[in-house]
Structure formats: structure tokens, C-alpha cells
Image (cartoon, rainbow, N blue to C red):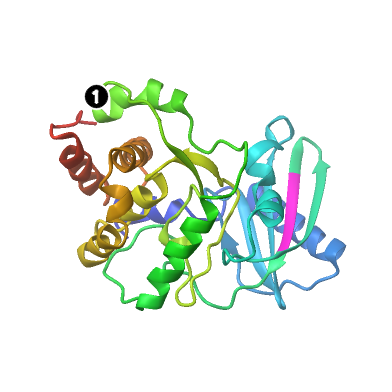
Amino acid sequence: MTVKRAVQQAVFAAPAERDELDRMRRAHAAAAKQFRVSAPGPEVWGWQGRALGRRAGDCWLRIVSAEVNKAGGRLWEGTATADTLVPRSVPRPRLRGVLDWTSADVAYRAELTEYVSVPPVTSGTPALVQDIALPDSWWAELKSALGTLATVPTDRESVRQNWVDRNFRRFLGIDPIRIREATTGHADRHWANLTRAPMVLLDWENWGRLPVGYDLGLLHAYSLAAPATAARIRREFDHVLDTDAGRTGELIALGQLLQACSRGVHPHLAPLISRQAEHLIGAPIPTP
């Protein structure tokens, strides 16, 4: 395995330390006992091993952990608030139960949701490595879900102006721009969070207010290694991406991805993301 491939796989991987691995497995088993379900399905690890999910019959049991002083807040409550506030017409797993507890200096949240039998487009990585064939109905479902979600009122902020102010010069080489048009979005719209047809949106922990064009810019960036799919995104959503507000949102998404690339995440995408940013800006961006 190449170094680049190893880094990419580590994004969604079990903890490297045995103690952490065992701790998360014990916590997942404890949650299954409390919910009175059996969860023998294969382990699916979240971002950098901070979450663990397994199938439990017709449910999906996922736990997330954090230091006690970092638990709670927007990310902690995202799935539950989405279940309450987002219309049922937006296809997503239904929440069936939530459980919170602490052990020593670690806090846990367990979420029991409806099991989605349709597999995600990608597994273990948010990015496409080759083009995919999705039916026209899938694109219509995505467009409908995005439009409905945009109408949801919320005070949750997924993308903040202060990130732009702090990071634009470093990663994009331009003065910070103002977020003048915001909408409600998913904020983590990538291919591991989208199922094949019928389309279902997974992982709602980060949803909230964000710049117009951000969600679509993110999905497009994660498709840059699959040019036909990337072109399809731009055709379907040119009414958003080809506006001043849409370009602002896309630039912010690209800037955040370049920050992740600077930390060793998505190494194969870094030059493609840089090229797309330079295309939007019309000038070279800083070299890492």
C-alpha cells in the first residue's frame, strides 16, 4: 500500500491504539445492551476513529465519543435536531433512540437509527476515484432534497465567516470574502454520505446554515477525479454554482478542503482541488 493510500484510508479507520479500539467496542456493546438490540454487523468506523457504527437488525447503532469538556453542542446534537426539524420528504435514516452517558473522562452518545439497505456510493473515502452511472431520478432526488433543506429555519451555523477571515489568505492567496447569501444545508455532502438509488442522505451531525453553493462545491470537489460526474454536477446545478453567491460558497468549500489536504488528508485530490480554486480565482494559489 502506498503512503498516499494509507493516509486516505486512515481518515475513516479504527483507532490505532489498542486501548482506544477496545474502549469504543465496549461502549458500543454497552449501548446495544441498553437499547436491547444485537449488533453483530461489520464495524464501520467514522472520521479518525471517533465514531463506530454496526448494523443491529433493522437498525443502525452508532456511537461517538469525546472528552467530557468537548462533548455536547452542534455536532453532538446534529442527528437529533435534524430528525426533529428537517421535513420527512428529505430522505434520511429515521432516528429511533438516543442515549448519553459518561465514563471516567469520556462522554458518549449512542444513536439508534433506521438501517438503510442501499449502500453508499463510496465506502471508506468521501471521494470518487472513477465515474459512476446514476439514473436521472437520483439527480432529481438530490435536487429536491437540497431545495427542501434550504427552506428549513435554524440557528445552527455550519460554516462561519471567521473561518474565511482567518484562512483565505493562507490557503487561497486572496483577501477574505463576505458570506452575503446563506442557506440551510447538509455541510458534509460527499459520496460516502450519499447512497445509490434511491438516494438517501446519511450523517447529519454537521447540518446547518452555510454559504449558498458550499454543499454543491464540496460534492463537486470530491468528484474531481471523476470528470464526467463532476461535469454532471455542474450541469445539474449551474443555476447555483454559476452565480456570485455560488462561487463564494464553492471557494469556501475548496479552501476548507485545502486546509484538510495540508494535514495529509485526501492527498490525491490536492492538485485537483488547487486547480479548481485557481480556475475560480483566476490566479495561482499559495504552494503548500
233 relative to 208 in the view: left or right = left
114 relative to 196 in the view: left or right = right
In the displayed structure, 60 sits above or below 63; it is below
Q: Main secondary structure of the magenta part?
A: strand
Quarter of the image containing the N terminus? bottom left
- Residue 164 place in picture, x, y as percent: 39, 27
Provide the residue span drawn in magenta: 108-112
Count of labels in the image: 1
Residue drawn at the location 33% of the way across and 56% of the way down: 5
Rate crowding at label 1 as few (under 14), some (14 to 19) or many (20 or more) other CA atoms within 10 Å.
some
Viewer-side residue, 45 vs 139: 139
- Residue 131 place in picture, x, y as percent: 26, 70
Q: Is residue 221 visible?
A: no
Residue drawn at the location 29% of the way across and 64% of the way down: 129
Amino acid marked by disc 1: Ile
Residue drawn at the location 53% of the way across and 77% of the way down: 118
Q: Secondary structure at mark 1?
A: loop
- Residue 11 place in picture, x, y as percent: 45, 51
Assess whether residue 196 is covered by the magenta stretch: no
Residue drawn at the location 26% of the way across and 30% of the way down: 172
In the displayed structure, 213 sits above or below 115; it is above
Viewer-side residue, 214 vs 60: 214
- Residue 214 place in picture, x, y as percent: 39, 44
Q: Is residue 163 visible?
A: yes
What residue sits right under mark 1 in the picture? 174
In the displayed structure, 133 sits above or below 207; it is below
Viewer-side residue, 86 vs 225: 86
Quarter of the image containing the C terminus? top left
Which quadrant of the figure has residue 63?
Answer: bottom right
